Amino acid sequence: MRSKKVQIMVETAVLVGAALLLSELRLFRAPQGGSVALGMLPIFVLAFRRGGAAALVGGALVGVLKIILGGYYVHPVQILLDYPASYMVLAVAGFGLFKKVRWLGVTAGTLLRLIVHVISGAVFFAEYTPEGYSVVGYSVVYNAWFMVPSAVLTLLIILLLDTRKEIFEPRV
């Protein structure tokens, strides 16, 4: 029993490190934050391998480490939304039907992450909204600009990895 817990902790640590690295390898960067990157991929792998609880912990760790490594913040609640919460919601992929139907898990997780970023953008970054535009609408468009391509790339890789069942089915 103890070796299973240790293995889960080690896998979580490795996948958190991979998420940090992949989030720094940006394909594109938005002017006021956000980027097209594959940082969600390892958290989804963790969710599919070890379940939602492990992915919640992994997502929280990624978020906290991103803050420590240079996160941008304007308010304590915004810090929680844009960093730990935005990665923790990916854990939904490790629960129930989402764990079995991986494309659905990735879709649900990235949609929840988009919602978290939209709320943060609408509440804490409203001053960047061009005059005459809806604050929420602008936040949706701004955040979708980097979230949709990131989600599509992540989903494609998950679907490719799905051909190798051992990636998502741990031995211990």
Image (cartoon, rainbow, N blue to C red):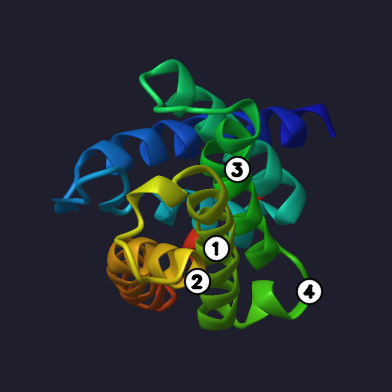
Q: Identify which amino acid the numbered label 1 is placed on.
A: Phe
First of labels 1, 3 by sequence position:
3
Q: Identify which amino acid the numbered label 3 is placed on.
A: Leu
Q: CA distance from mark 3 to mark 2?
A: 33 Å
| Observer able to see residue 132 | yes
Front label number (3 vs 2): 3
Residue to which mark 4 is pinned: 96
The residue located at (57%, 28%) in the rendering is 75
Front label number (1 vs 3): 3
- On residue 168, the disc is 1
Q: CA distance from mark 4 to mark 3?
A: 24 Å
The residue located at (48%, 35%) in the rendering is 16
Residue to which mark 2 is pinned: 165
**In the picture, residue 32 is in which quadrant?**
top left
Q: Which residue occupies the foreground of this view, 168 or 38? A: 38
First of labels 2, 4 by sequence position:
4
The residue located at (40%, 28%) in the rendering is 72
Q: Position of residue 63 (x, y in %)?
A: 53, 34
